[in-house]
Amino acid sequence: MNTPLVSVIVPVYNVASYLEQCLDSIVNQTYRHLEIILVDDGSTDESGAICDRYAEQDSRIKVVHKENGGQSSARNVALDMMMGEWVLFVDSDDWIELNTLELLFEQKDERADIVEFGFSYNYLEEESNQLLNEDMVCSGRHALKLLALTEKPMGIMCDKLFRTETLGNLRFIEGRYYEDTPFVIEFLWKSKFYQYIPSVLYRYRRDRTGQTTYKMVADIQKHMHQNLESLMERYANEPEMMLYLSTWYLNRTKKELLTLYTEAKEDWQEFKRVLGPHWKLACGMPFIKTSILQNLKLRAFQYNPYLYASVLSCLQSIAEKLKGKNN
């Protein structure tokens, strides 16, 4: 089996309690040809010292200590210095299965520029697997269309292996939150082929810290809109990309609004104002034009986002109750 060098990038900030589990899952990979870059982003706990200790024990590890600049800044520092043919991102409070890279290279299609795989959300002793149904290889543009319409592939970073040659000078937007999706969108745009491997290999740690609030959703929406504006400015001369961006943004906004529709009632006019420029583009997308259901859903959301979210939430609640009775 060909053994290309893989750069594993880990931004680190105040995660001393979890960092060793993360690093153990990387240094003990059954696939050994790794370059492991740990970027200590100005940690004030023992995280930096833990990074240094691991580097002393494993020559594959490189440690960078820098002033705090955020996760995107830390990732970009590592991208500028990495040497690998492929790159994998791991958040420092998460972990990966020990056979992750071995399995990916055994099953990877030679044409693939980006390989996505399954992950799980881990809450203490509970876990929730996030998997698509089957293996898939398709063009990068087709995967981008799927992301815009269904968010599958997911717009997150750490469940994907990226080809460095395709990456080129693509970097993360700094000074923003929720920067994963813009990066994934741009990478898919540059990619010839996308592959999905249905194996749960990445473990996201999620602590139960209380319910999501409307303020949190509004904050997500604000940063999503800022990221969208940056991308639309960059790709203003690419009609196909503009179409994908508007459709993704509308579908993502529907999802966020549905999360807390009862608290969003007073703000649905503001949602309509912000989303206004994107309706025409999204409604022109061939899939939406030819799908009566998708068209109706989009039109309903355009007419009244709050009403759309209320009805959909009610239908989901009924479906859950019926499902419970049938089990």
Image (tube, rainbow, N blue to C red):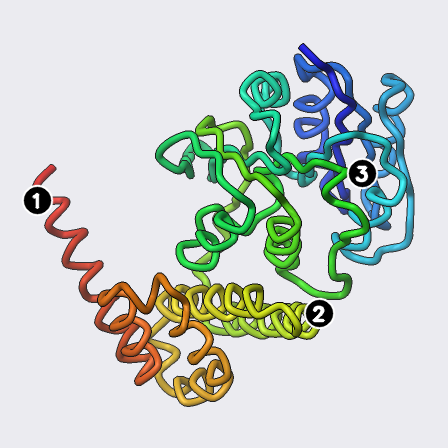
Percent of width and height locating residue 200: 47, 28
- Tell which circle, 3 or 2, labels the residue nearer the N-terminal end: 3
Residue at horizontal 70 percent and vertical 65 percent from the top: 176
**Dot 3: few (<14), some (14–19), or many (≥20) neighbours within 10 Å?**
many
- Name the residue that disc number 2 marks: 234
- Tell which circle, 2 or 1, labels the residue nearer the N-terminal end: 2
Percent of width and height locating residue 74: 81, 49
Give the numbered dot on residue 47: 3
Q: Does residue 325 appear to the left or right of 290 in the view shown? A: left
Tell me which amino acid carries mark 1. Answer: Lys
- Tell which circle, 1 or 3, labels the residue nearer the N-terminal end: 3
Q: Are marks 1 and 3 in contact (CB under 8 Å)?
A: no
Percent of width and height locating residue 253: 45, 69
Name of the residue lying farthest toward the left:
326
| Alpha carbon distance from label 1 to label 3 | 48 Å
Percent of width and height locating residue 254: 39, 69
| Alpha carbon distance from label 3 to label 2 | 37 Å
- Can you tell which of label 1 and label 3 is closer to the viewer? 1
Residue at horizontal 76 percent and vertical 65 percent from the top: 175
Q: Quadrant of residue 16?
A: top right
- Can you tell which of label 2 and label 1 is closer to the viewer? 2
Residue 122 visible somewhere in the drawing: no
- Name the residue that disc number 1 marks: 325
Q: Secondary structure at mark 2?
A: helix
Give the numbered dot on residue 170: none
Residue 179, compared with residue 152, is above or below; it is: below
